[in-house]
């Protein structure tokens, strides 16, 4: 993970400033990684009038379906499928990103992630991360800083340990525990 580390101004490195925040996804375009969830979330962000770009790095069997969905939702100007990239290109993309998103979930055939490498690399690079809380990653989420977790497959509830995203630190959340101890909206 030494290659993926926070930008170091002492070594002359700089985070690359973008006009609008870049949300970055790095992973195979397969159901268990949840890239289709990000496309739907991008549609919601656009409907709310928020400026952003979503970049998905990777390839896989869902690529054609994702391209079609991006077009159907009219998101071609803000969502890009960038394909496979080498490590140096991924690191440069992380320097441009405002945050990293990986909405992993259990796929219909039961396939699931543990702790994805790209998520650990994004955290090592100093990015804020948003992902789902799956059974194998629970202890990891308890110790992660700048990490927000969501129940698998959900766009409704996204929370930082101790408080939901977007609420003031003193505001109490109205929630109950869902399957596997994940919070769910009430």
Image: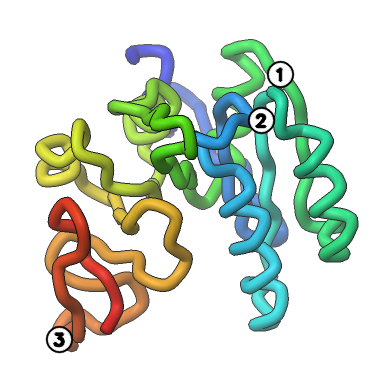
Q: Mark 3 sits on what residue? A: 172
Q: SS at mark 1?
A: loop
Give the distance between the C-alpha atoms of the residues marked 3 and 2, in whole angstroms: 36 Å
Label 2 with label 1: CB-CB less than 8 Å: yes
Above or below, comparing residue 174 to residue 180 in the picture: below
Q: Residue at x 40, y 39 (%)?
A: 106
Res 114 quadrant in image: top left
Few, some or many residues within 10 Å of mark 2 (<14, 14–19, 20+): many
Res 90 quadrant in image: top right
Locate residue 161, reporting x and y percent: 16, 60
- Viewer-proximal residue among 6 and 71: 71
Locate residue 47, reporting x and y percent: 70, 80
Q: SS at mark 3?
A: loop
Above or below, comparing residue 83 to residue 9 in the picture: above
Q: Which residue is drawn at 13% across and 67% down?
A: 162
Number of the label disc, if any, that sits on residue 57 = 2
Q: Which residue is drawn at 27% across and 41% down?
A: 134
Quick check: can you spot residue 163?
A: yes
- Viewer-proximal residue among 13 and 86: 86
Number of the label disc, if any, that sits on residue 84 = 1
């Amino acid at each position: 993970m030494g290659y993926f580390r926070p930008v170091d101004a002492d070594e002359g490195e700089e985070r690359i400033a973008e006009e609008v925040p870049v949300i970055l996804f790095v992973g195979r375009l397969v159901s268990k990684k949840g890239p289709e969830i990000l496309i739907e979330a991008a549609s919601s962000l656009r409907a709310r009038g928020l400026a952003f770009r979503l970049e998905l790095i990777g390839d896989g069997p869902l690529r054609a379906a994702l391209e079609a969905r991006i077009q159907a939702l009219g998101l071609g100007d803000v969502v890009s499928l960038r394909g496979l990239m080498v490590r140096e290109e991924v690191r440069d993309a992380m320097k441009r990103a405002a945050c990293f998103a990986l909405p992993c979930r259990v796929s219909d055939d039961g396939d699931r992630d543990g702790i994805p490498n790209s998520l650990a690399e994004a955290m090592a690079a100093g990015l804020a991360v948003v992902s789902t809380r799956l059974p194998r990653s629970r202890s990891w989420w308890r110790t992660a800083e700048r990490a927000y977790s969501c129940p698998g497959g959900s766009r409704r509830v996204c929370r930082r340990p101790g408080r939901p995203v977007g609420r003031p630190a003193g505001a109490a959340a109205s929630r109950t525990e869902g399957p596997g101890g994940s919070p769910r909206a009430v």
